[in-house]
């Protein structure tokens, strides 16, 4: 896989981890993973569709949060966001050639 795509996957993974750690807001995550996703070259259509399905779930939760005045997620929204982030993270990790690379932004 190209070094370029690898860098895009690593960017997405770093953002997903930051969200899980509580250092990145849902609003930022939804916005920030779009560019590296769009920049992928030659990725399979099925993978992209699955990624977008999970991203859309996050976007819908973000929209609900915004509508409520950024109160934060509650109950089912928190669970749905965690599930979507976990799925995206697994998808991205599966595409990284050497996820345990010590030079990776995620160790």
Image (spheres, rainbow, N blue to C red):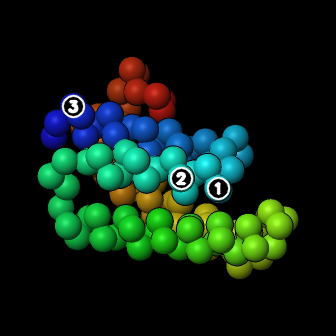
Element at label 1: helix
Tell me if label 2 and label 1 are in contact, CB under 8 Å: yes
Residue at mark 2 = 31
Residue at mark 1 = 27
Element at label 2: helix
Residue 47, position as x, y percentages in the image: 26, 64
Residue 99, position as x, y percentages in the image: 35, 37
Residue mark closest to the camera, 1 vs 3: 1
Residue at mark 3 = 3
Residue 82, position as x, y percentages in the image: 61, 64
Element at label 3: helix
Q: Residue at x 32, y 52 (%)?
A: 38
Q: Is residue 86 placed above or below 8 in the rendered structure?
A: below
Separation of marks 2 and 1 at Cα, in angstroms: 6 Å
Q: How many marks?
A: 3
Q: Residue furthest bottom?
A: 76
Residue 46, position as x, y percentages in the image: 23, 70
Q: Residue at x 26, y 48 (%)?
A: 40
Q: Earlier in the sequence, mark 1 or mark 3?
A: 3
């Amino acid at each position: 896989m190209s070094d370029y795509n690898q860098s895009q996957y690593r960017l997405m993974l770093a953002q997903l981890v930051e969200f899980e750690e509580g250092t990145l807001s849902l609003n930022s995550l939804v916005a920030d993973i779009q560019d590296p996703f769009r920049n992928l070259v030659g990725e399979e259509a099925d993978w992209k569709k699955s990624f977008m399905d999970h991203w859309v779930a996050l976007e819908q939760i973000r929209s609900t949060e915004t509508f409520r005045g950024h109160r934060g997620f509650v109950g089912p929204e928190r669970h749905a966001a965690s599930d979507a982030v976990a799925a995206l993270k697994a998808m991205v990790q599966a595409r990284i050639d050497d996820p345990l690379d010590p030079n990776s932004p995620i160790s």
